[in-house]
Image (spheres, rainbow, N blue to C red):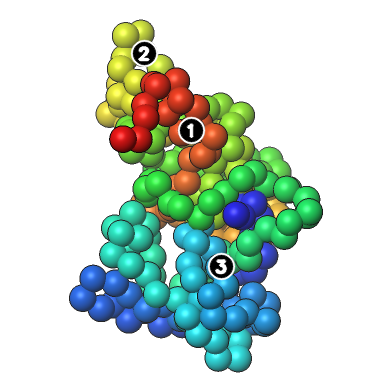
Amino acid sequence: MFTGIVEELGKAAALDLLADSARLTIYAPLVAEGAATGNSIAVNGVCLTVTGTDGDQFTADVMGETLARSTLGGLASGAPVNLERPAAVGGRLDGHIVQGHVDGTGVIIESRPADRWHVLRISIPGELSRYVVEKGSVAVDGVSLTVSALSPLRSGRPRGAADADGENWFEVSLIPETLARTTLGVAGVGDRVNIEVDVIAKYVERLMAGGEQR
C-alpha cells in the first residue's frame, strides 16, 4: 500500500518493449538505495516489483495489462517519474490509501495558474467518473490530491455519462510544494496521466449492488 506522497522525482533510464511486456529501468538515487529484488515501488502511481538493482538504478518488468491501463509504455528516456516506496506499518498516512493499481488514464484539458496554486482540469473515462467526488481523494500519476471541482451533473443524466460538452472531468489544485516535487509541475495540456480512484468507493459500490463471487 502507498499513500500518494512522492518521495523522489526520478528519471526513466530505459524502456525495453518486448512482445507483450516491457522492462523499465529507473534512475532513482534515493529510492534505489537499499532496494532489493522483490520490493515494490510505485512509478507514476503504478506498483511495480523490483527485478534488479545497479547502483542508483532499479529495473522492473511491466506486463501487458499494465501497459494498456497506464502511461508507462510511452515513457521516453530521461522523462521524470514520481516514485514512492510502500507505506511502513505504524507510520502516518499523510495522503490517502493508494494501491498502485491504476484504473485508467486521463488527459489534462486545462491548466491555469492562480494566486498561490495551480489548477489542472483532467478528463476522465465515464466508467471511472462515478467514483470521483468533490473534496474526495484521487491519485494522479501517483500523487494524492483532493478533488476541487467536477463536471456538472445534468438532470436525468445516467451515472458516468458525459456532460454537455461530451467530457467528464475533475479539477485538482496544486500547491507550490507539489509543483516542485512531482511531475505535475511540468505537465501540460494534452498530457496523459495515470488515475487511481478511491478504492473504498469501489468496494462500497460492489457491496451496495449485492454482487457475489461465484
Q: Label 3 crowding class (10 Å Cα cut-off): few <14, some 14-19, many 20+?
A: many
Does residue 173 sit above or below 81 in this rendering? Answer: above
Q: Label 2 crowding class (10 Å Cα cut-off): few <14, some 14-19, many 20+?
A: few
Q: Secondary structure at mark 3?
A: strand
Q: Label 1 crowding class (10 Å Cα cut-off): few <14, some 14-19, many 20+?
A: few
Dot 3 or dot 2, earlier in sequence: 3
Q: CA distance from mark 2 to mark 1?
A: 26 Å
Dot 3 or dot 1, earlier in sequence: 3
Q: CA distance from mark 3 to mark 2?
A: 40 Å
Q: Say which mark, if any, is on residue 154.
A: 2
At horizontal 53% and vertical 38% (from top left) the residue drawn is: 198
Question: Disc 1 marks which residue?
Answer: 203
Q: Say which mark, if any, is on residue 41.
A: 3
> Which amino acid, mark 3?
Ile
Report the side of 91 relative to 85 (left or right): right
Does residue 166 sit above or below 1 in this rendering? Answer: above
Q: Secondary structure at mark 1?
A: helix
Front-lying residue, 28 or 214? 214
Report the side of 129 relative to 20 (left or right): right
